[in-house]
Image (cartoon, rainbow, N blue to C red):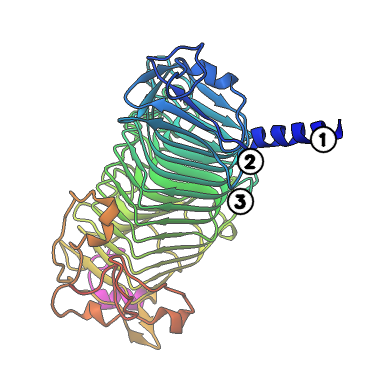
Amino acid sequence: MFLKLFLYAILIFAACKTRTSYYFSLEGDDKNDGSIQHPLKTIRNLNALYLKAGDTIFLKGGENFNGSIFLKINGSAQKPIVLASYGNGRAIINAGNETAITLYQSSYINIKNIICKGVGRKNGNTKPGINVSDCNDINISNVDVSGFQKSGLQLYNCIDTKIDNINAHDNGAAGISVEGKLSNKRSSRNIYITNCTAVNNPGDPTKLDNHSGNGIIVGHCTNVVIDHCLATNNGWDMPRIGNGPVGIWCYEANNVIIQHCISYRNRTSPGAADGGGFDFDGGTTNSIIQYCLSYQNQGSGYCIFQYWGASPWHNNIVRFNISIDDGLVSDSRAGVYVWNSSKDAAQFYNCDVYNNTIYNSQQAALRFSETSRRKNFRFCNNIFIGKDSLIRGDKGIDTFLANDWWSMEKKFNADGVYDFTAWIKKNNVEQLNNKIIGLNVLPPFKDTGDTTFTDVKNISNFNSYKIIGASPVTHAGIDLPALLKINIGDKDFNGKPVNKKYMGACTNE
């Protein structure tokens, strides 16, 4: 008797260890066993499956499956549960007015090679496309998601999640969003967003009290990387006048890295604010924007913001980035915009902006809002080029060292002063040991005004703003590690070794 029970237990254990694959095809039958030879037909049956670690769900590529998928399951690190397409092409989940895929309180799930469609942000859908909530160790890759009123892909309160090669387009609130619990930056953490695009997410027609139409937005989170992502043509149909959307940005977030990204021609609703390229907004701490390209956004290319009621904003870096003709429409009117509606410098401090190339043939290079009280902001080794006045607003007591300034119309114009040396002496800027170290020269760029580059996978090959030939900007910068104890990293915008005496984002051609 004991031997029989022992053998039975072994069989049960073996059965639990066996990985099962379930296949779905419109040519199948819901009475089938789900094998590849006898697939199931409708995905509503998927929600009733008893799934275990290591199981795989296959939807036939090229076929349209109506309905929604809801999973509350746990795989393991060695045996994740997989949802994917099989055969030729990607399977399409037509969710109609609902969410296409929901993961709730789940772990170790991989979703890949799927297309998710809603009926449209103004045509009846009121949901996100993929909703991942209270989960950990989720991988989502090679997914196209469109036609949802909220975010195309929405993560809430998630840990150790990887998002790769997502095309989120024609949604409402955002292409991709990450959120955590209010007043808790650690409830969502260790999130990696790579090789994603957020295109034409115009706005949520029902959101009348706050911004919508963002490309990629992350908030209430810690340890987030946004790498080699692209955002464009977002935010143009936000249904309100007020604070607006941005291409790629974060708020109430700690240790966020945004790098090797392109954000261009993002918009906001007529009369509204923002519509910029990149943004470190209220409550952002210990974060970096680096090696990014921004151009022709209605708002500023690089926004440095603190709003009233946010937790303190501090210890952030903006470096080795390029801005071209940003701030064309909304209130910024500049490539870089600093704003603090909290009106308290103790809430907004410690920011290093260095080795950026800000080129603006239409507006100013820098804008400081009337409400922008701050402390310990340092601008070093940048190239600032503007149409006429280089700075709008009160630059306060910020540190400006070894920057190159050039006004296209007047050679130099800042604070109503047209003489560079006089401006330096009046404002006590661009001096070190009583020696002028700033420049007022037009750099010999290889090319300017290139606003056609969209190859985010090869962003380091963007060469237009490299310096060609001899120029003071190649050796007049200051050694930031030695003089200001700033760790500048080891490469420039193009991935070349950093020249510590260089101004701007790129080294020589």
The kind of residue tagged 2 is Leu
Q: Looking at the picture, how far across and down is residue 77, in whole percent?
A: 59, 47
Name the residue tied to disc 2. 182
Could you say which disc has been placed on residue 460 in the image? none
Task: Nearest to the eye among marks 3 and 1: give it.
Answer: 1
Residue in the picture at 39% in, 31% down: 85
Quadrant occupied by the N terminus: top right
Range of magenta residues: 413-426
The quarter of the picture where residue 461 lies is bottom left
Instruction: Note whether residue 288 is visible.
Output: yes
Residue in the picture at 54% in, 28% down: 102
Q: Are marks 3 and 1 in contact (CB under 8 Å)?
A: no
Give the secondary structure at mark 3: loop
Q: Between residues 330 and 19, which one lies in front from this camera angle?
A: 19
Name the residue tied to disc 1. 3
Give the secondary structure at mark 1: helix
Q: Earlier in the sequence, mark 2 or mark 3?
A: 2
Residue 123 vs 328, above or below: the answer is above
The quarter of the picture where residue 49 lies is top right
| In magenta segment, residue 83 | no
Q: On the picture, is 188 further left or further right than 64?
A: right
Tell me if mark 1 has few (under 14), some (14-19) or many (20+) residues whose alpha carbon lies within 10 angstroms of its own: few
Could you say which disc has been placed on residue 311 in the image? 3
